[in-house]
Image (tube, rainbow, N blue to C red):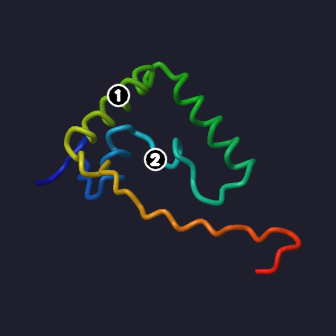
Amino acid sequence: MKCIVAGHQAVTATEFAELALGTPVELWLGVEGETDDERAARLDAARDILAHPEYRNLPDELIRLATRVVDDRPDLFDVVPLARPARRRAARKGVAA
């Protein structure tokens, strides 16, 4: 099945989100290792986009998109309990181990 948005074919989930939202997901999520200045510039750009009349419904669209993902792929949110490592007791001062 092909996912086509605005005449562009989305191959990955990230590409689909970018095409659906009209912005790269990194703008909203950031990138690993970004500097404080890069983060500030990214957030300024995001605020400018949200202030534009064309994007006034973007928060609602994001909520609808997230809801669709949860409905379509509930397995993405499966919680798997992890084994808790045994706690080591701290040695008391003055007591031989």
Q: Mark 1 points at which residue?
A: 61
Which element type, helix, strand or loop, lies under badge 2? Answer: loop
Residue furthest out toward the front: 95
Quarter containing the N terminus? bottom left
Q: Residue visible at 59% across and 29% down? A: 48
Observer-nearest of 10 and 31: 31
Left or right of residue 61, residue 8 in this image: left
Answer few, some or many: residues within 10 Å of disc 2's Cα (few below 14, many 20 plus, some between 14 and 19). some
Observer-nearest of 36 and 82: 82
Query: Where's residue 79, x and y in %?
Result: 34, 51
Q: State which quadrant residue 43 falls in.
A: top right
Q: Which amino acid does label 1 sit on?
A: Glu
Residue furthest out toward the left: 1
Q: Mark 2 points at which residue?
A: 24
Which element type, helix, strand or loop, lies under badge 1? Answer: helix
- What is the C-alpha distance between the residues marked 1 and 2? 15 Å
Q: Which amino acid does label 2 sit on?
A: Pro
The vertical placement of 33 against 23, above or below, is below
Give the mark nearer the N terminus: 1 vs 2: 2
Q: Residue visible at 77% across and 71% down? A: 91
Which tag is nearer the camera, tag 1 or tag 2?
A: 1
Q: Residue visible at 43% across and 26% down? A: 59
